[in-house]
Amino acid sequence: MSNLKVSFLGLGVMGFPMAGHLSKAGYSVTVYNRTAKKAQDWLAAYGNADASACNSVAEAVKDADIVFMCVGNDDDVRDVGTQALEIMKAGSVLVDHTTASADVARELYASSNDKQIGFLDAPVSGGQAGAENGQLTIMVGGDEEVFAQVEPVMAHYARHSQLLGKSGSGQLAKMMNQICIAGIVQGLAEALHFGQRAGLDCNAVIDVISKGAAQSWQMENRASTMLNNSFDFGFAVDWMRKDLNIALDEARKNGSTLALTALVDQYYSDVQKLGGGRWDTSSLLTRLK
């Protein structure tokens, strides 16, 4: 049993199992969620003798050595993060797993430093399945000594975590991740659409080309479900549009050109108009039918 006391703020589809892995690893875990029932559900699923649920951010973080949070957007990060920093003790660490802007990461980093609290922006990739299986990839921005302190704890739900630079670097890396995914999924959707129109056995074609240069995680994990019109799992279109708009906003600031990303973002808008806001991101195929 570790002597570290950790808190987890935000028990959505990602935070719920991530906090669960920490509890299973023997940490004393305190959880908070705006919907209190979710915290009670977490206790029922993962609670050990030292686990607890609190009704406020302040109560949840007051004794914590490390506070993790995984919430919705920049406003949530500012709100929850600011509440946490008002109470957290000097020498503790705040880790934000939310996909948010680099600006909000830098803001919280500065506020944390003022209070002698460590801060890492640490967005994750791997989706709900990655969180449940403890196989997330974590992109981290912040100070090396703080990362060294937290990395062994994050390892309980990550297959790989890496410090990529100063504060904000984790969020910028996650933007790159989402830019790549958007283009790959659109290319896969167009290929499947083309193959179906050409009268090919697309499952057989995917079996072949997935062993060559066209191979990707999306192809191996989503091609068959796309062909079966199954879009009720994984990372939702609404969330992807949030992430792509963060990337597009950052691109306007740094002068980069994201023509394909902007186009795919509009394609996701088409999917939303079809009622697919909660469909998996592979649902780009639906707008081609």
Image (cartoon, grey):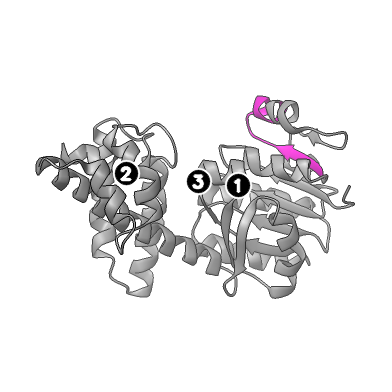
As drawn, is 229 to the left or to the right of 125?
A: left
Q: Nearer the viewer, residue 206 or 108?
A: 206
Figure check: 51 above or below 146: above
Task: Where is residue 192? Give x, y as percent.
Answer: 21, 45
Q: Residue 136: in sight, yes or no?
A: yes
Residue at numbered disc 3: 127
Q: Which residues are magenta?
A: 28-40
Could you say which disc has been placed on residue 70 in the image? 1
> Please, what secondary structure does the residue beneath circle 2 have?
helix
State which quadrant residue 150 falls in: bottom right
As drawn, is 240 to the left or to the right of 124?
A: left
Q: CA distance from mark 3 to mark 2?
A: 17 Å
Could you say which disc has been placed on residue 223 in the image? 2
Residue at the (87%, 37%) spot, across then down: 50
Task: Where is residue 247? Give x, y as percent.
Answer: 39, 61
Amino acid type at circle 3 is Gly
Q: Residue 113: in sight, yes or no?
A: no
Say which label, 3 or 2, has the lower sequence index.
3
Task: Where is residue 171? Give x, y as percent.
Answer: 51, 62
> Please, what secondary structure does the residue beneath circle 3 have?
helix
> Is residue 37 shown in magenta?
yes
